Image (cartoon, grey):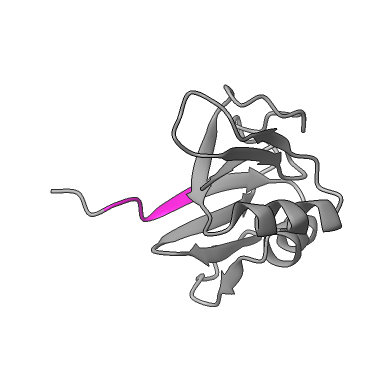
Amino acid sequence: MYEGIHHVSLLVTDIERAKRFYGEVLGFQESNERPDFGFPGAWYQVGETQIHLIVHKEGKTLRGVTSIDSRDGHFAIRVQDMESFIKRMRSHQVEILDKPNNQTDWHQVFVSDPDGNLIEFNC
């Protein structure tokens, strides 16, 4: 019945700042398929799933903080090489919460985007 998650939408307040983070820092590939919705945004392809950035400063899901709490709302992206991912984050001075030993069978690393959206990367 279900095929998978098509996209995750994230609210951001500054599209250029968000695009620098998702495109340059994380290295996600921006899609050119986004229609003109009449408001700023961007789409990124990550495997079979898309991430949709939407500028909506009055949105209710903006956390208002960039502190990292692994129990707060987040989504997860599987990476092939965790050490390379951590090295990339450190080279961009991105704060991480590194949890190599936890209750799961996988290494978890959490990051916050500039608007406080939390993302878990695991391997």
Describe residue 7's horizontal placement relative to residue 79 as left or right. Answer: left
Describe residue 87's horizontal placement relative to residue 120 as left or right. Answer: right
Place of residue 21 in the rendered image (x, y in percent of width and height, measured from the top left) = 74, 57
Vertical placement of 66 versus 94: above or below? Answer: above
Q: Is residue 5 magenta?
A: yes
Vertical placement of 56 versus 100: above or below? Answer: below
Magenta segment's dominant SS is: loop
Vertical placement of 77 versus 58: above or below? Answer: below
Can residue 19 be seen in the rendering of this structure?
yes
Q: Magenta region: which residues?
A: 4-8
Place of residue 2 in the rendered image (x, y in percent of width and height, measured from the top left) = 19, 49
Residue 15 quadrant:
bottom right
Can residue 118 be seen in the rendering of this structure?
no
Tell me the residue at 86%/50% (across/down): 93
Residue 105 quadrant:
top left
Place of residue 79 in the rendered image (x, y in percent of width and height, measured from the top left) = 53, 55
